[in-house]
Image (tube, helix red, strand yellow):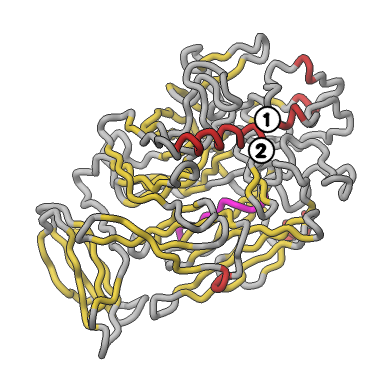
Amino acid sequence: MFEFAMRMTFQLKLTLSAVVLLRVLDSQVVESAPFVINTNLQIRLVMNTKDGVPAYSIRVAKDPRNHQLYYAKMNGFIYRLNSLPDTGVASSAIIYNSTDHGISEGAQGMTIGPDGTIYFVANAPTSDGNSTVARIMKGVPNANGTRTWKLLAKTDPYPRSKTAFDHVFNGVVVSPDGNHIYVNSGSRTDHGEVQSGGGAFPGTREVPLTAKILRLPASGLDLVLPNDANALRNAGYIFCEGIRNAFDMAFAPNGDLFGTENGPDRDMSEELNWLRPGLHYGFPWRIGGTDNPQQFRNYDPSRDRLLDHRFLAYLAGYYHDDPTFPPPPANLTEPVINAGPDADSYRDATDGSIKDASEQGRKVSTFTAHRSPLGLVFDTAGAMAPPFQHHAFVLSWTAGDASGASVPGPFKDASEDLLDVDLTRLGDTNYQARITRLVGGFLNPIDAEIIGNRIYVLEYGGNQGLWEVSFPPNPSQPAAVEILSPAIRGNDFSFAFATEAGQRYEVQFAASLNPTAWNTFTNFTGNGAMLIVSGPVTGMQRFYRVSAK
């Protein structure tokens, strides 16, 4: 459902655009704040990222070395979050733009590796808008704290459908060891139908560079990704297939990789998938645990109870009898099972009624249709107290109707929320999840990051707020230390971080960015206030870190 079709100007599918526009217009008068559903949590606004730059915020990411937060806009601007400890007001500064990495439009993905390298994914039209070229740039840290930008990989031009279903390259994640990146290349169709690109590509459905997760070496430079399945496979770049649009991916504490999946303009469940090499995740033959009926002869959309006539794909005639639909591959892999109690509404294909799966004693695969799951994060550090410890957490983009189906979106499901996803592995076949709503009332939340027991949620709608959701901390583990942006104050280099009363801290320094040894700068006990650490700029080069004891 979540369609980020890029023609270098932002384009949502028509049915979603109307909803977003109304919410944004409303927010100019009164913008309601998100609210906690689970009262053990706390939420606060860190800052609004909407500024004078006419571009939407699309990604938030942390530098794992020091928990510094960054966010990116679709025009290629990357911001670093600053904090003013004396006032408690958060702000940000642009630190990279097209002058640095060459991306001025179509930015879709950003993540940061364990060594501080920023991976930035963007797409651009070519051939008069008939084709797409995707680029993956990487900003590699230098010893002086800056980054040098290099091209990791670039695709050959590949066919656009020139519809709202050109999902292009977007979600990207780094392996825990930092050796590989995984990047999603979404589908160019809604559900595998022919999309000729206005006649430029007759008979074309998906192509070798679409509907896949690619695995690339993080050390790569100037790699070329051809629109050729055999060449991609021989190079070892294809990780898995049958992915419609995994806009976000994340590694679980046990190392398993998961990806959210946005579904089509038909009332089919949207997915969370356990992503494994060499497997096929069903698109376009099987979506949300259900067969795509267009693959079968004599399909009659007028009798299809799961087609909402308000959606673009129906209005454009993309659902139809399709006798040349290709046969499915063998052994399609099923999505994670949702055992409820939340985000599990479904439409009955027999009578068209809306039902709650867990109330009916059923399970869905995985989320209510049209939720558009995004912003996947895990408590890999175990920094949260039970029952949240080591869980996954997922955002949902699309505004829904909590009591019915009055909007073209999630039905009997408010959506636009943060979900707790408690996963249980079912041997080597799949996972089952208990899914519970935690926070509601966001405005098109688009991405999330996690630092210790706090989740940071970035909104696309309204003022593009950045919100901090605090969970009860693991009582046996010190809270993560968030180092705020460094600054030059007079002759001193300084940085600041928040302390907890009674918590012991050690500040250490080293003479290089990747030292073999760290030296103690100071030890102290926190008092709940901000601490500023400073050292001389001239005469020496130092790198600092803080650890909680």
Residue 53 lies, in percent from the top left, at 51, 58
Residue at 36% of width from left, 45% of height from top?
467
Residue at 58% of width from left, 66% of height from top?
137
Instruction: Give the dominant element type of the magenta stretch: helix, strand or loop.
Output: strand
Which secondary structure, mark 2? loop
Residue 320 visible within the image: yes
* Residue behind mark 2: 13
Give the mark nearest the N terminus, 2 or 1.
Answer: 2
* 185 horizontally vs 140: left or right: right
Q: Which amino acid lies under the numbered mark 2 shown in the image of this protein?
A: Lys
Question: Residue 511 occupies which quadrant of the picture?
Answer: bottom left
Q: Which amino acid lies under the numbered mark 1 shown in the image of this protein?
A: Asp
* 522 horizontally vs 403: left or right: left
Question: Residue 223 occupies which quadrant of the picture?
Answer: bottom right
Quarter of the rendering occupied by the N terminus: top right
Gap between marks 2 and 1, in whole Å?
A: 10 Å
Question: Residue 524 occupies which quadrant of the picture?
Answer: bottom left
Residue 90 lies, in percent from the top left, at 31, 56
Residue 432 in magenta stretch:
no
* Residue behind mark 1: 265
* 468 horizontally vs 333: left or right: left
